[in-house]
Image (cartoon, rainbow, N blue to C red):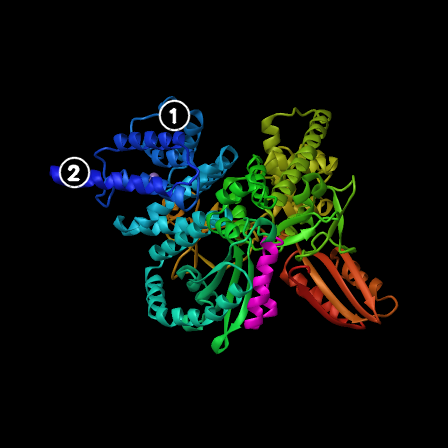
């Protein structure tokens, strides 16, 4: 490079730095400026001579990240300095100790957090998940780490053009998979939207290009319509003393594409391609009434759709979002979404966590749902039992879910994901409350544990000292917290019984003059077909494996397989016989253990019983690979989002729970007859039964334990034949 060129470049660096300073909050002190200057100087020096893939000097990147941190997120001097320094320790010879010496321990801590979250794209799914967990762990140190990381990711996405195609795909899908939902959850609306649009641009370039072209082509008409719509509003609002700005905001390309896909409509058929946003200048005391006043004036002009009123002011969303939404009938018979909010609400909505925090310090923002969320994450992370991949999946479920608002008996508000049951609610309040939950009253009415909550429900938990978490509970809950607590409690319970079983077994063996050694335990396991000694001990502890069985084992210790063939054995213990036939004939996928069509991959030719995972291919559906397949690592790291958990099960031995809804005409003895048919004739285990009879109409919900679909069909058919029963239907979710 010539000296002139270098001169030009240096000028550009200084210019960008000055823009950065202008983007800082107005309340920035001289001390703050000194800190930022020092960080800037060090970063310039450390990255000197290094260039990015695009050919630009490397320092452009940290300056841009700092700019996003200052302007779009609204963070202060420490974060800006950390953003400037974020790649220094990772990419140059400077160490964390240097950061502490030259700056302070806080800056060291944040940079340490940032350095730990290496880019995920190159790794195995479990490492990715572990990495993500680490990223969330930094929440407990300092939320700023994640905020700066998001800014870093945003700038990398903005400059992704110079990367190779396959890397764009990888980084783009990772952004959609983790970073955009996280930005959303932290309330960073602007950043979330941009991450989504850019993610789409690199993962599905054709769709992205088409949609943005169509948006451009229709822009003029849209702008005209917006003007026509807002003109009368402006006048009315002003004449009633409301100072406000009215803007038409196009919806993001990502959200329009999502609508086209999910609703199966064309671009033209998406009616809400834009929303009108009204931002009111208000005082804290008048915020709410001003917003409703605006609502009232708007709906004087345009008729509102009564089903589309959303009041996020009285009850802000869990990510801190506050606004009043309505959809009104605009000129030409078009539905138009109108968002009403104050300037403060707008800042919180756009900038998220930092703005929320700032107003909270000033005592303005509502008690933070956001902090609740951060605390929940912390609690989840502290549970060492949960496996990283499960955690990631559960966490993501919670990231995407819509929210409902429910009340405690005292009238306190709790936010839960949509679809949460009363059991989720109990665990949300307190783990102990969940673990001992016997039932709940919703709006004064007694409901089963699986009962799903709706917004506005008031829930009272009924507990009992004797209650303990049951396996079936896992089917009732959807929150990660409840799942984790139930799982770890079940594990503990199993361990405790196994512990007892171990002692019993030791005593019994001693009695039979056999010592309690590893080799004897191994023989026992293979004799009775247990996978682990824990299972063996557990069955001894819970009485499934009896004294007689163990005596038989000892008697036949050396020739047990011959004994297996003897009739006595078969007759004497059916349960053990079943264990004998353990087989893996069915593959199930995902958490819900769904049966899906699949094919075997050719590269590792898995067989039933192997440790496998499913991989969604574009043309050939789901293929299964062995975990130790040579291709597994590559698939998992490049296409983590296409991986499905898979597990072999023995379908003849898998119990599942089915919920039957029985309707009919009530008569004396009907209930007795139904239960008799189930338990005596069909030998079906009834788990719970809930029957009501109103005006001679019988309506019952019965939970039965069944082995497979065939036996369920015969249950339904048999019940239908009973006198007076008009319908028997399987229900999939209790409502
Ligand atoms: Mn970076």
C-alpha separation, residue under disc 2 versus residue under disc 1: 29 Å
| Residue drawn at 68 percent across, 56 percent down | 456
User: Residue 6 got which mark?
Assistant: 2
Per the image, label 1 sits on a secondary structure element best described as loop
Q: In what quadrant of the picture does the C terminus appear?
A: bottom right
Quadrant in the picture for residue 447: bottom right
The answer to whether 439 is drawn above or below residue 716 in the figure is above
- In the rendering, at what x and y percent does residue 470 appear? 69, 45
Q: In what quadrant of the picture does the N terminus appear?
A: top left
| Quadrant of picture, ligand 1 | top left
The answer to whether 258 is drawn above or below residue 355 in the figure is below
Q: Is residue 26 left or right of residue 340?
A: left
Answer whether residue 17 is visible to the viewer in this image.
Answer: yes
Tell me, yes or no, whether the highlighted magenta stretch contains residue 294.
yes
Quadrant in the picture for residue 482: top right
Name the residue carrying label 1: 103
The answer to which of 158 and 302 lies nearer the viewer is 302
The answer to whether 430 is drawn above or below residue 595 in the figure is above
């Amino acid at each position: 490079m010539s000296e002139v060129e270098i001169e030009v470049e240096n000028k550009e660096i200084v210019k960008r730095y000055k823009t950065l300073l202008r983007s800082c909050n107005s309340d920035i002190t001289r001390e703050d400026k000194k800190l930022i200057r020092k960080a800037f100087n060090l970063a310039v020096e450390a990255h000197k001579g290094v260039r990015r893939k695009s050919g630009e000097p490397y320092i452009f990147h940290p300056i841009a990240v700092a700019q996003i941190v200052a302007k779009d997120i609204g963070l202060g001097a420490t974060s800006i300095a950390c953003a400037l320094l974020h790649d220094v320790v990772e990419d140059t010879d400077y160490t964390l100790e240097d950061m502490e010496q030259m700056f302070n321990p806080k800056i060291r801590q944040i940079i340490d957090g940032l350095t730990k979250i290496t880019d995920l794209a190159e790794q195995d799914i479990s490492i990715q998940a572990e990495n993500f967990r680490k990223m969330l762990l930094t929440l407990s140190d300092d939320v700023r780490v994640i905020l700066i990381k998001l800014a870093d990711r945003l700038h990398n996405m903005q400059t992704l053009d110079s990367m190779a195609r396959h890397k764009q795909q990888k980084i783009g899908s990772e952004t959609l998979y983790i970073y955009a939902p996280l930005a959303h959850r932290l309330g960073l609306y602007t950043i979330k939207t941009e991450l989504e649009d850019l993610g789409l641009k690199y993962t599905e370039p054709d769709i992205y290009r088409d949609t943005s072209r169509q948006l451009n082509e229709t822009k003029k008409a849209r702008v005209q319509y917006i003007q026509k719509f807002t003109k009368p509003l402006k006048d009315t609002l002003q004449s009633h003393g409301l100072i406000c700005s009215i803007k038409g905001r196009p919806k993001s390309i990502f959200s329009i594409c999502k609508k086209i896909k999910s609703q199966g409509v064309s671009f033209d058929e998406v009616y809400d391609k834009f929303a009108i946003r009204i931002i009111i200048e208000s005082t804290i005391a008048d915020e709410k009434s001003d917003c409703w006043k605006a609502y009232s004036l708007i709906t004087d002009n345009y008729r509102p759709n009564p089903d589309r009123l959303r009041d996020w002011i009285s009850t802000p969303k869990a990510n801190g979002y506050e606004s009043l939404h309505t959809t009104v009938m605009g000129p030409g018979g078009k539905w138009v979404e109108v968002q009403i909010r104050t300037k403060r609400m707008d800042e919180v909505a756009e900038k998220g966590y930092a703005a929320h925090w700032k107003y909270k310090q000033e005592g303005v923002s509502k008690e933070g749902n956001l902090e609740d969320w951060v605390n929940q994450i912390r609690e989840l992370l502290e549970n060492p039992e949960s496996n990283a991949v499960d955690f990631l999946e559960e966490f993501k479920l919670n990231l995407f879910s819509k929210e409902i608002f429910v009340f405690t008996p005292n009238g306190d508000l709790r936010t839960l994901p949509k679809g949460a049951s009363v059991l989720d609610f109990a665990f949300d309040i307190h783990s102990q409350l969940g673990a001992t939950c016997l039932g709940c009253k919703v709006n004064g009415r007694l409901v089963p544990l699986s009962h799903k909550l709706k917004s506005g429900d008031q829930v009272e938990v009924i507990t009992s000292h004797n209650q303990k978490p049951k396996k079936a509970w896992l089917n009732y809950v959807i929150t990660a917290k409840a799942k984790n607590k139930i799982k770890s409690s079940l594990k503990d319970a199993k361990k405790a019984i196994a512990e007892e079983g171990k002692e019993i077994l030791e005593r019994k063996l001693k009695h039979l003059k056999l010592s309690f050694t590893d080799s004897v335990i191994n023989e026992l396991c293979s004799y009775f077909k247990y996978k682990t000694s824990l299972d063996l001990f557990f069955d001894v502890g819970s009485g499934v494996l009896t004294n007689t069985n163990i005596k038989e084992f000892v008697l036949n210790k050396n020739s047990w397989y011959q004994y297996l063939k003897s009739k006595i054995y078969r007759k004497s213990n059916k349960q053990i016989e079943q264990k004998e036939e353990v087989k893996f004939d069915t593959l199930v996928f995902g958490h819900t253990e769904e049966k899906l069509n699949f094919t075997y991959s050719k590269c590792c030719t898995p067989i039933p019983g192997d440790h496998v995972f499913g991989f969604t291919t574009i043309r050939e559906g789901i293929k299964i690979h062995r975990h130790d397949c040579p291709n597994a690592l590559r698939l998992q790291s490049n296409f983590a989002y296409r991986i499905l958990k898979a597990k072999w099960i023995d379908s003849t031995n898998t119990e599942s729970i089915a919920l039957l809804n029985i309707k009919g005409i009530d008569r004396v003895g009907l209930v007795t007859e139904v239960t008799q048919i189930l338990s005596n004739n069909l030998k079906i285990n009834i788990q719970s039964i809930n029957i009501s009879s109103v005006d001679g109409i019988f309506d019952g919900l019965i939970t039965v334990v069944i082995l497979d679909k065939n036996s369920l069909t015969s249950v339904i058919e048999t019940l239908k034949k009973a006198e007076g029963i008009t319908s028997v239907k399987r229900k999939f979710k209790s409502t």
